[in-house]
Image (spheres, rainbow, N blue to C red):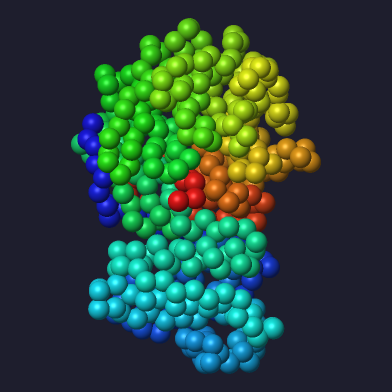
Amino acid sequence: MLLASTFARSELLIKVTEGRVDAVPIAVVPFAGSQGAPEDVSAIVAADLHRSGQFKPLPAEDMLSRPSKQSEVIYRDFRVLGMEYIVAGSMKAQETGGYEITYALYDVSSEVKLLEETYRPPVSQLRDVAHAISDRIYEQLTGIPGAFSTKILYVTHNRGAANPFQLQYADADGHRVTTILRSREPIMSPAWSPDGRKVTYVSFEDRGLPAIYVHELATTKREKVSSFKGINGAPDWSPDGQKLALTLSRDGNPEIYMLDINTKALTRLTNHYGIDTEPRWLPDGENLVFTSSRSGGPQIYKLNINDKSVRRVSFQGAYNARPDVTPDGRYLVYVHRRNGNFNVGVQDLQRGTFNIVTRTDMDESPSVAPNGSMVIYGTQDRGTGVLEAVSIDGRVKVELPSKEGEVREPAWSPFL
């Protein structure tokens, strides 16, 4: 086992394979002064918006003019190209070593400015500012908070390496990969704390036996919080960050427990001869969903932690497992088996509808973005583990293969 907190070169490659046919045309004009800058902020913004599948950025070479401020905007030049919105701005190097970045968002049809902001970041935060700009534009035009400033946590496996298993996180666009942990033994089930400052995971580093750790990202300090005999698995943080739901077999059968992180008090929540596992908190902090075999095959159940009542919530097919929930609690996302294939399905808990949103055949570990718009999941590409993402309605698909090794067990961070 080797602790680490370093930037790695192995970044995720992101490719939009399927976007909305009604994606909004938008021109992100190259920012004045961006040539020679360490990061091209306008290019990052254009890539973010494109990756969402909701927008179709205009290639810079097709632009008839390149304004950097309102007085230079010629709306006709963009209207003739079918653009609905324009993003224009500038980057100016500061004596302090940072940059002043100003941008504005314009509506082509009404010829009005919708949004304008100025940032003065150090060089090290140029990508952060770019993602923040993308978030603001996305929310202005869709009404939904953007998730471009978030992170993705995942496990990589490089066969033949001295420590083949790595726990890593990266920006939502795959850049700035940071390695948290390297190990000779498997790492599983990573999950973010609600404030994004800690992660929890299962590691087999101690004599090949599973144990659950809580790991503080800024200090690399970590604590083993569960190492009972048998299964220690599938940890998930409560919305208040004070408890973990987890799977233990300490009493002989896999059951759902709740661990108070501060007092270490342990509460058993289920008691059934079936296998209960993979708990996920609902946003209200009083209910969980989990996978159970109590009906004969894996299905999703809902558990109230106060009265410990349990009711089944998935009924489509004979196999439904590994649930996650959108932040508003409306949609239940899980792995569904259909015709021998394992796909990601989305169940509307209000309307009762259910839709398969992926077309791959070995999907696992779905994790919902904090704005509820996308789901990231692990799958197989020619026998190699890769990550892919799909919109909650299945209309947008994105591939996130790694440059080296297999990638699995993704977890999308909260808003940071």
At 53% from the left and 42% from the top, the residue drawn is 367
Residue 138, image x, y percentages? 58, 65
Is residue 172 depicted above or below 189 in this figure? Answer: below
At 52% from the left and 85% from the top, the residue drawn is 62
Residue 359, image x, y percentages? 61, 47
Is residue 201 depicted above or below 96 in this figure? Answer: above
Q: Is residue 101 left or right of residue 82?
A: left
Residue 256, image x, y percentages? 54, 19
Where, by quadrant of the figure, is residue 184 drawn? Answer: top left
Query: Where the N terminus falls, by quadrant?
Result: top left
Q: Is residue 195 visible?
A: yes
Q: Is residue 399 left or right of residue 37?
A: right
Where, by quadrant of the figure, is residue 198 drawn? Answer: top left
Is residue 27 depicted above or below 379 in this figure? Answer: below
Residue 225, image x, y percentages? 37, 23
Q: Is residue 218 left or right of residue 107?
A: left
At 66% from the left and 17% from the top, the residue drawn is 307
Viewer-proximal residue among 198 and 354: 198
Q: Outermost residue, right direction?
A: 351
